[in-house]
Amino acid sequence: MNRPLEFMTQVVFVFHLHFMMEYSLFDLPIMEGWKVGILMFEFHGWAVILDSPGEEGSGASSIYDRVTQYVELLKPNTDVLELKAINRQYHLWLSGLNNHEPTSKYDPVEIMQTIGVMAPGSYGLLYVYNDVNEQLSNVFRVFVLARGCVKERDDPFLSPIIPVVADEC
């Protein structure tokens, strides 16, 4: 049966929320046919694309063209990666949920770093949850893009995931 994409997206989202709330990240159930519990690499981010940190950028059109070409190369392998002009300002959104860490080219942190190099006035945030990495399995990491540089920060809002977001079972 063919279902609309919105329905399938809702099913995946609801499953993920249910999974996060039902099971401890450290004591995942092993279901029939599974060798190990499900590990996740989740990311959500945004950036405003600017050519310089000043109020008015001078080459916004050419920067937008370069960023558009870069985004188009990555789109087939990134869950959500959109670039859109809103009121003459360019915005990038990226989001994904994988059962493994992405390869370098598709790493959301690397994407943000590349945007910073291409458009050094850009700013934005990227939240990454990586329980594939045991040391990071109970926290979100925040990557801040400002003035062309990406810096990693502790998350003050959603971490530690247990007990802030999910209950331990």
Image (tube, helix red, strand yellow):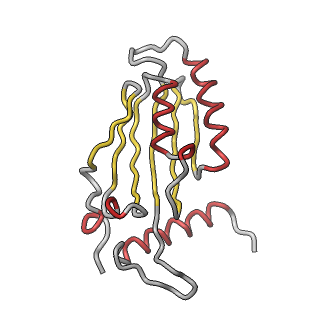
Q: Residue at x 48, y 19 (%)?
A: 51
Q: Residue at x 28, y 76 (%)?
A: 168
Q: Position of residue 75 (x, y in %)?
A: 64, 44
Number of dots carrying numbers:
0
Q: Position of residue 147 (x, y in %)?
A: 37, 24
Q: Position of residue 110 (x, y in %)?
A: 48, 40
Q: Residue at x 51, y 42 (%)?
A: 93
* Side of 29 where 59 appears, left or right: right
Q: Residue at x 58, y 41 (%)?
A: 82
* Side of 78 where 44 appears, left or right: left
Q: Position of residue 115 (x, y in %)?
A: 50, 31
- Extreme-bottom residue of the structure: 32
- Extreme-top residue of the structure: 58
Q: Nearer the viewer, residue 102 or 57?
A: 102
Q: Is residue 90 above or below residue 54?
A: below
Which quadrant, please, contains the N terminus?
A: bottom right
Q: Is residue 132 above or below residue 152?
A: below
* Side of 116 where 81 appears, left or right: right
Q: Is residue 24 above or below residue 71?
A: below
* Side of 134 where 14 appears, left or right: right
Which quadrant, please, contains the C terminus?
A: bottom left
Q: Is residue 59 above or below residue 148?
A: above
